[in-house]
Amino acid sequence: MEKEKQVLVIFPHPDDEAFGVSGTISKHIKEGTPVTYACLTLGEMGRNLGNPPFATRESLPLIRKKELKKAAEVMGITDLRMMGYRDKTLEFENDEKLANMVTELIEELDPSLIITFYPGYSVHPDHEATARAVVRAVRRLPKASRPKLHCLAFSNDCKEHLGQPDITNDIRDVKDQKIETMKAHSSQTAWMLPQIEQGIAAQDPEALRWVTIEHFWTYDWENDQVK
């Protein structure tokens, strides 16, 4: 994995980082790279309230805030930004306002790498709005000055349109941190983690995938379709 000057991770919800990029984040931090995680909302509209339920609709925002802080601690992140947007409303935010927020982060941090979702291939409206805002902000920069943009994509048609992932990071040396990061978001993950851990113990390929590799696509500026 290439050594970076500064990594900026931008996702809309607590736990977005846990499943797809927490191993990569932990590896960057182990290598001494500063990592900033900008989480746009507290995921307060999440459907899961724990398994068995331990949260209420009223208590969930505070619980998810604590879970996010714990996940950041597990990964080693010391620069966690909670941006204060409301869950499930990002698609209705002003496009320029969201892009300006990302621009301010870029100007402050001067990242060599930004990690976010791939616009058009990340399913959830909040994911899509976040991805578009990042692309708009990076697009404003001269091509020679743009940070690398590594994106998560998981829509059913992503490989059909994007091809195979451009980047595969081996995260086996930080697999325990990835599991603990997922556990930190227990209100959202308690229902699935026992099954994953059982699969890992049984060497099930699908379960092992969670703790061995993380895939990314580089953003295709030649076919940029974000409006």
Image (cartoon, rainbow, N blue to C red):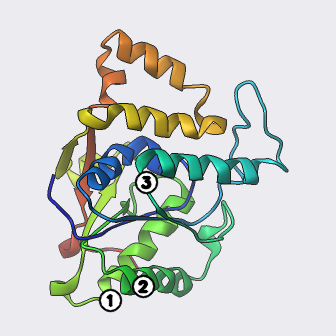
Relative to 58, residue 48 above or below: above
Mark 3 lies on a secondary structure that is loop
Front residue of this view, candidates 75 and 145:
75
Q: Which residue is mark 1?
A: 140
Identify the residue at image location x=31%, y=37%.
Answer: 174
Mark 2 lies on a secondary structure that is helix
Relative to 150, residue 45 above or below: above
Identify the residue at image location x=75%, y=53%.
Answer: 62
The kind of residue tagged 2 is Thr
The kind of residue tagged 1 is Arg
User: Marks 3 and 2, how far apart in space?
Assistant: 21 Å
What is the number of callouts on the image? Answer: 3
The kind of residue tagged 3 is Ser
Residue 103 - label: 2
Chain-order first, disc 1 or disc 3: 3
Identify the residue at image location x=36%, y=79%.
Answer: 109
Quarter of the rendering containing residue 192: top right
Q: Does the rendering let one see residue 154?
A: no
Cβ–Cβ under 8 Å for marks 2 and 1: yes
Q: Which residue is mark 3?
A: 122
Q: Position of residue 128 (x, y in %)?
A: 48, 63
Q: Position of residue 169 (x, y in %)?
A: 21, 44
Q: Along the horizontal axis of the image, is 60 left or right of 24? A: right
Q: For the residue carrying disc 2, how many other residues have a C-alpha within 10 Å: few (<14), some (14-19), or many (20+)?
A: many
User: Marks 1 and 3, how far apart in space?
Assistant: 22 Å
Q: Position of residue 77 (x, y in %)?
A: 43, 57
Q: Position of residue 129 (x, y in %)?
A: 51, 68
Identify the residue at image location x=62%, y=63%.
Answer: 41
Front residue of this view, candidates 60 and 88:
60
User: Marks 2 and 1, how far apart in space?
Assistant: 9 Å
Chain-order first, disc 3 or disc 2: 2
